[in-house]
Image (cartoon, grey):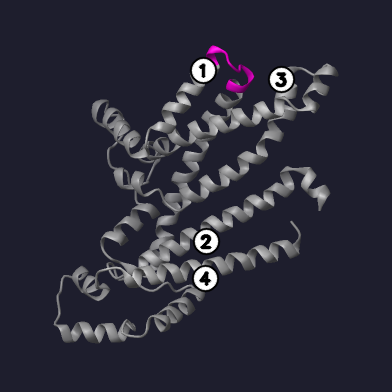
Amino acid sequence: MTGKQLGKRIVQILIVLIGISFFTFMLTYLAPGDPVRTMYAASGTMPSEEVLQAAREELGLNDPILVQYGHWLTNCLHGDFGKSYSTGKPVAELLLARLWPTLKLALCAMVLMLIVSVPLGMLSAVYRNKPIDYIVRGFTFFGISMPNFWVGLLLMYFICIVLGWLPVVSTGIGLKKIILPAVTLAFAMSSKYTRQVRTAVLEEMHQDYVTGARARGASEREILWKQVFPNSLLPLITMFGLSLGSLLGGTAVVEVIFSYQGLGNLAVSAITSYDYNLIQGYVLWVALIYMVVNLIVDISYYWVDPRIRVKR
């Protein structure tokens, strides 16, 4: 990717972020609930209506909507997403505090997914339409059909309650408290990626260069790992980037089930408490993560596929 192309992508990211921020701000503005009452309720007090009106005036909530959005966007550009109405802490501080637990969970889930899906996908492709292929495809069908919350509840019941191997409540500190949420997330992803690996490998195995390699006497193992597998990576990189962006945005259902203190759990708490500043900051944060990950994926194409470098 050239410098000019990179600059155009960054400009596009900024334009999209502004559009998302405006849309999110309008939705939270139209949503029910009073953030000022929420703020005082969190502190355990309920002041008079005069005090509430004075607080709204001080926070600028009585200004026209476009004026409020302009002030909020200006502050965001300086790294200030405002303060949480429910906790009184800066939104940026809350988001950063939950980033590391979510990052650990995402990386663990992705590692588990790759360990399972790549060998199974290649095995299924190599032994196509044989018993092991049918077994792997049956596993993937079962995995895709199971929603995350159901997998999480089943794991919690059997592993934590019946066997007592792991704690029920996870705080994201230590391997024992992160493994169940990671396995839950990796379960469905492994099924999806196994199918994608199988499809990509099968497509590459029917290419002319594979036939040529066999004619030159190359072994099947060498063809598979040195030629077929690297060429199968390109379509998988896009999926990998989207999955990583989704996980870094926080997986609310799984985090709530296991009481995991990540971004998804924070978002659910913000929604239930009508914490509009926190909701707006979270949406903008997730959008930024997605677009940055997609940009990194596009840049990685340049290094993974030599044909792209030749064309440019």
**Of marks 2 and 1, the one in the foreground:** 1
The residue carrying pointer 4 sits among few (fewer than 14), some (14 to 19) or many (20 or more) residues within 10 Å by Cα, namely some
Range of magenta residues: 124-132
The answer to whether residue 262 is seen in the rendering is: no
Which residue of the protein is positioned furthest toward the top in this rendering?
131
Asked whether, in this view, residue 80 is left or right of residue 177, the answer is: right
Mark 4 and mark 2 lie on one chain; the one further toward the N terminus is: 4
Please report contact status of discs 2 and 1: CB closer than 8 Å, yes or no: no
- Label of residue 134 in the image: 1
Q: Which residue is mark 3?
A: 221
Q: Local crowd at mark 3 within 10 Å, few (<14), some, or many (≥20)?
A: few
User: Does residue 125 belong to the magenta stretch?
Assistant: yes
Q: Which mark is residue 213?
A: none
Between discs 2 and 3, the one toward the N terminus? 3
Label number found at residue 288:
2
Of the numbered discs 4 and 1, the one sitting upstream in the chain is: 4
